[in-house]
Image: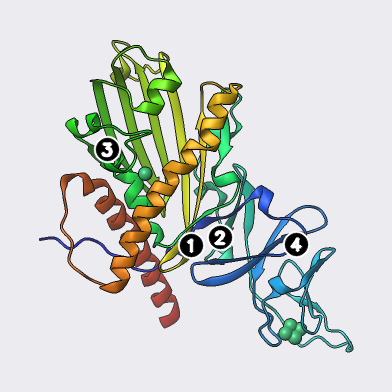
Amino acid sequence: MEQIPGNKGFLRNSWYVAAFDNEVGSEPLARMFLNEPVVLYRDEAGAAVALEDRCCHRHLPLSQGNVIGDVLQCGYHGLEFDRTGACVRVPGQSQIPPEAKIRSYPVTEKWNWIWIWMGDPARADESLIPDWHWVEDEGWRTVKGNGGKPLPVDCNYQLVSDNLLDISHLSYVHTSSIGNGAIMDFPIKTERLNREIRMSRIVMDRPPAPFWGWAGKFKGNVDRWLVTSCEMPAFVVNDAVSVELGTDMRAGHRDHGVEMRVLNAPTPETDTTCHYFYAHARNFGLDDPDVQNAYLTQFTEVFLEDKFVLEGQQRMMNLKPGATEIDINSDAPSIAARRLLGELIDAEQAELMSGAAE
Ligand code: FES
Ligand SMILES: [Fe+2]
C-alpha cells in the first residue's frame, strides 16, 4: 500500500497568519510560529512589527520588555531594538557591538489578519497571500472566529487541513449544526491545481442540515454545494452553499439560496500544536442579529467539536509515533494535499542544500 505522505517539517518560504489585526498594539505579544519564538507589536505609525522573541544579550524574551515609541526595549538591561532587529541603544555605553542584532520577519496586513513570512525575507511575495476578497465585499459580512483570537489546538496543523478537506466528518462530528447523513450518499471529486487541492461534493435533493434549514428558511429538500480548496501550506476555504431544488446549481446558479465561506488558516506553533485562525463570511442575513449571533455562538461550538477530535488524534499519535493507519475513499483530498505540500517542502530543502553546498 502506498505510504501516506507524513509531516516533513514546515514550508518556510510562505506566509502564515500571525494574529488578528485587533490583537496587536503597543504591548508586545509573544507567539511561537514553526517552533520559533516571535514578538509582535505596532510602532508609533501603527505598522505591525515582528521580531525574534529573544534578546541577543542574555536571552530574555523581548516580549517581557516594553515598546517605547518605535523600538522594543528589553526588560532586563534595557537594550533597544528597531523594526529591522538592529540594536540601536545600549544603556551606559556609546558603542553598540556590531553583532547586536536579532531576526526580524516581514509582516503585512490583509483580510483582518497580520501575516508573517517565516522564510528568506528577500523572497516574501504578497501575491502568495490567498485571495479572500469576501472580507472586503459589501455584499458579504465577515465574523472573526473565536472572538478575534486564534483557537489554540494541540495538534499538528496538517491535522486541521486534513479535517477541513474531509467533509464526511460533518456527518459524525457536527450532526446538530452543519452536518447530516445525506452527505455520505454523494461522491467526492479531487483536483490538483497549481498550489492548491480542491475537493468538491455536490449533494442533490436532500434535507438541509439543521443550520442551513434555519438560515435559508427552506421548506423542503435542497441542493447543496460543498467545495473545499486548500492552498499551500494550509489556507483552506470551505465554500458552502444550500439552494432551492430545481435552480440549476450544478451549472453554477447560486442565487436561490444561502452561501458562506469559511476562511481557515491554521498556523503551526510547534510540531504538535497550532494557532487555528478562522473567520466566516456570509452573503445572507447581513444585518440580522439572530444570524450574527449564530455565528458568534453556535459556530464556536462547531470549532470546539473539531478541537476535541483533533487533540484526541494528536494525543494518540504522540503515544505511538508512526503507528500504522489505513486509508478510505474520503481521504483522497487530504492525501493529495499532503503530497503537494511535501513536494514543495522537498523542493525548498533541496534548494537550501544546494545553496549550502556552493
Ligand atoms: S538580556 Fe536583554 S538587555 Fe540583557
Ligand atoms: Fe469540522
Disc 1, disc 2: CB below 8 Å? yes
Secondary structure at badge 4 equals loop
- Name the residue that disc number 1 marks: 13
Q: CA distance from mark 1 to mark 3?
A: 36 Å
First of labels 2, 4 by sequence position = 4
What residue is rendered at 16% in x and 45% in y? Answer: 329
- Name the residue that disc number 3 marks: 171
Tag on residue 249? none
What residue is rendered at 51% in x and 31% in y? Answer: 294
Amino acid, disc 3: Ser
- Name the residue that disc number 2 marks: 117
Tag on residue 27? 4
Q: CA distance from mark 3 to mark 4?
A: 43 Å
First of labels 1, 3 by sequence position = 1
Number of the front mark, 1 or 3: 3
Number of the front mark, 1 or 4: 4
Task: Characterize the local packing of mark 2: few (<14), some (14-19) or many (20 or more) Cα atoms within 10 angstroms.
Answer: many
Q: CA distance from mark 3 to mark 2?
A: 36 Å
Quadrant including the C terminus: bottom left
What residue is rendered at 21% in x and 44% in y? Answer: 330
Secondary structure at badge 1 equals loop
Task: Characterize the local packing of mark 1: few (<14), some (14-19) or many (20 or more) Cα atoms within 10 angstroms.
Answer: some
Q: Quadrant of residue 61?
A: bottom right
